[in-house]
Image (spheres, rainbow, N blue to C red):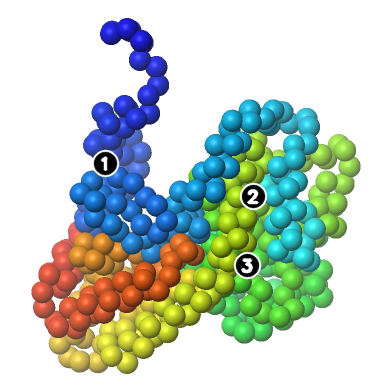
Amino acid sequence: MTDGGPQGFDLKRLLAERGAERYDLHARHLNHQLPRMLHTIGFDKVYERAEGAYFWDAEGNDYLDMLAGFGVMGIGRHHPVVRRALHDVLDAQLADLTRFDCQPLPGLLAEKLLGHSPHLDRVFFGNSGTEAVETALKFARYATGKPRVLYCTHAFHGLTTGSLSVNGESGFRDGFAPLLPDTPIALGDLDALRRELKRGDVAALVVEPIQGKGVHAAPPGFLREAQELLHRHKALLIADEVQTGLGRTGDFYAYQHEDGVEPDLVCVAKALSGGYVPVGATLGKDWIFRKVYSSMDRVLVHSASFGSNAQAMAAGLAVLTVMEDEETVANARRTGDLLRERLSALVDRYELLHEVRGRGLMIGIEFGRPSSLKLRSRWTMLQAARKGLFAQMVVVPLLQKHRILTQVSGDHLEVIKLIPPLIIGEAEVDRFVAAFTEVMDDAHSGGGLMWDFGRTLVKQAVANR
């Protein structure tokens, strides 16, 4: 182009010229509370690049990612096999999304997914976890002819209206009523399940085998007994594996940890994307799909404009191939066991550390009321201002001092959730445990910058009331 003429679109130039405005742009044009929150807790970092389980800033400092984009980056960031697949599918210039043909990639990805799900028969591809749940809710209602879906307290199944109706947290639901007429039960409460099923109008129970909020696993035997009760009343079991699926817990699906559990519908997303192209999938039994798509007149009764697009399908196929070739599920089990054992050994050492739980590389670290008077008074101060502040006090120095990104497991929870990329190994376990031990030592010393930050959080919590 000549000087002064049209420049066209140049992504590198745009980022070079405007990248430094990232937080201002969000504050002006997107969710204005996000940059405010990040500034408040000191998470307003500028990451320049990422690979595997690490980020790097402009100075070349590395940051260990123990969050994996809320579980999206199951095989790490920018895996070369997924990148190559996306380059290849773009270069192929496929006649994608014509809407009136059958491209091979969706069928191939469905075949590969079903190979890990031998009791299921068919797949619907959407664009996200919440869409996968919405699909399951619709299919369950139509297949059973019943209107009501049961869900578990503290569950998270998404934020669109249908999935919000089975979201067990009032903080997400408040102000968005009326929702669908669904009913919560406590995770593991078979008596409540029996009571609701007797009403005769239950289409399904949707459940996370391990809840993301707080990292609470379904009690042993619950899923199997719930499945038997549901089927006895001609209702379905829906397993939400959006975060737990694709190896996160040391099996391909979390429900596979319990013998005899074969959900009627299974929802997956997140890690299937490879971190590049949004994709969600609802897997189900043949008879359910045949009821929903019962005639040619109903061929488009449930569809998604971008569902089954070539880029998403290529990414999914590449992800599953990487998982098989690199034995990612076995690594998640092995590394998760090591990390959980190392952390559990610290429970008796620190009075503020209450419990370490989880499965595979989905681990919850819960803090609780200390016994010593000095620490107890400070703990009480934090709890009076807002529950969850101590966990935030741990997360911040992990990032600021040790360059490790983690998350508090939910609002008003004293739990940190670890959901790192499934490719981490012993070196990352050593780094995290060493950093966590140092943060715990600081917390139990009763002074220093950590408790100074706690007082700042208290002031902020009080101001926000």
Is 29 on the left-hand or right-hand side of 44? right
| In front: label 2 or label 1 | 2
| In front: label 3 or label 2 | 2
Q: Nearer the viewer, residue 30 or 377?
A: 30
Q: CA distance from mark 3 to mark 2?
A: 15 Å
Q: Which mark is residue 389?
A: none
Q: Position of residue 382 (x, y in %)?
A: 23, 74
- Mark 3, Cα crowd under 10 Å, few <14 / some 14-19 / many 20+, is many
Which residue has dot 1 on it? 23
- Label whose residue precedes the other's in the sequence (3 or 2): 3
Residue 362's place in the image compared with 377, above or below, is: above
- Mark 1, Cα crowd under 10 Å, few <14 / some 14-19 / many 20+, is some
Q: Position of residue 216 (x, y in %)?
A: 50, 76
Is 434 on the left-hand or right-hand side of 424? left
- Label whose residue precedes the other's in the sequence (1 or 3): 1
Residue 34's place in the image compared with 193, above or below, is: above
Which residue has dot 2 on it? 317
Which residue has dot 3 on it? 252
Q: Nearer the viewer, residue 138 or 93?
A: 93
Q: Position of residue 10 (x, y in %)?
A: 37, 24
- Label whose residue precedes the other's in the sequence (2 or 1): 1
Q: Amino acid at mark 1?
A: Tyr
